[in-house]
Image: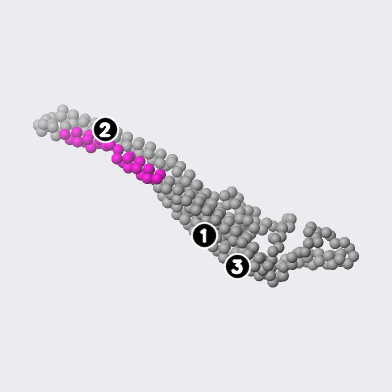
Amino acid sequence: ASYLHGLALGFSSLAEQHDLATSHYEGVRQQFKTLLARPDNRGALVTKFQQEYNAVDVDALKLKETQAELVLRSEELREALWALCDKKMEDAEAERARVSGDTFVPDHTAIMGQYYTSLAQVELDRFYSALSFARGYAAVKYGVLKPPAVPEEGAPADITAAAPDLATGSVPPELKDKLDEKSKTALQFPATVTQLAAKSAPLATALKIALASGAAAAAALQPQPEDPKKKGKDAKAGGKDAKGGKGGKATPTPGEGEEEEVVAPEVQEAIAAEVRKVGEQEAAILEARLLLLAERAAAQMEGLAG
């Protein structure tokens, strides 16, 4: 329900932005038409001059005084026409400065980027919810009712536990090497996402974080090679426990006395395989939807600026 509500809210907000942009550009278009349709007296001035010239007697046109008067009137006409042209140029420059100084496009591009970021967050939350559901379903399916183990102190954060907050724009520590272009483990993001940085850098960063988060979560579900050092430590710890069982006191642990649920290795592997399968499918779906959002965002922002 929250997923559908988030999508409905995001798409309705984008539709509202589209209506605002349409209304804004319609107003700009009407203002430009009004500017072009301004009254122009140049034709009337030329017509008046022609009428006055034609009213002069043909014989009078041969007189130098008449010719000088007509030259003077033609110069006055030229100055009047230039004055009207200069006034129109000033009005046009003022209108151009007003339109170019309008912050509608950058302001609404930023707002649109926030709406697309919220949609990306909705998709990322759905991805993590699917992983959580798959874990719970697989555990119950195989009869494992043990709650998730609490990570040890100092252990790295579980990248599959919770979705990062895309609205903040901060990159989680475990994903910094994925987004750092100089890192050897940096991800190669599609051109659709990288080119979006020119239009909305925060949205491009949010999409990169979401894509890297989904890829890292899917990779974390893959079988990891066993660490030889950790294996040696576990063997030593097991030996000490065996020695302590002969005569020494065992160190008490929280919840001692309660029967601990033991999960067979094959059951653990079966649960992990099911969760891994779901994770791979959901990661592919997440990537496809995020790229679709990037394409739509780029097209809509380009239309807004066009």
Q: Name the residue under label 1.
A: 289
Q: Nearer the viewer, residue 132 or 223?
A: 132
Q: Which amino acid does label 2 sit on?
A: Ala
Image coordinates for residue 181, horizontal then vertical, percent: 59, 56
Q: Is residue 69 left or right of residue 91?
A: left
Q: Which of 114 and 53 is in front in this view?
A: 114
Q: Name the residue under label 3.
A: 277
Secondary-structure class at tag 2: helix
Does the CB distance between marks 3 and 1 fall below 8 Å?
no
Secondary-structure class at tag 1: helix
| Distance (Cα) linking label 2 and label 3 | 82 Å
Query: Within 10 angstroms of label 3, few (less than 14), some, or many (20 or more) residues?
Result: some
| Distance (Cα) linking label 3 and label 1 | 19 Å
Query: Within 10 angstroms of label 2, few (less than 14), some, or many (20 or more) residues?
Result: some
Residue 59 vertical position relative to residue 210 in the rendered view, above or below:
above
Q: Nearer the viewer, residue 123 or 208?
A: 123
State which tag comes first along the sequence, 2 or 1. 2
Query: Within 10 angstroms of label 1, few (less than 14), some, or many (20 or more) residues?
Result: some
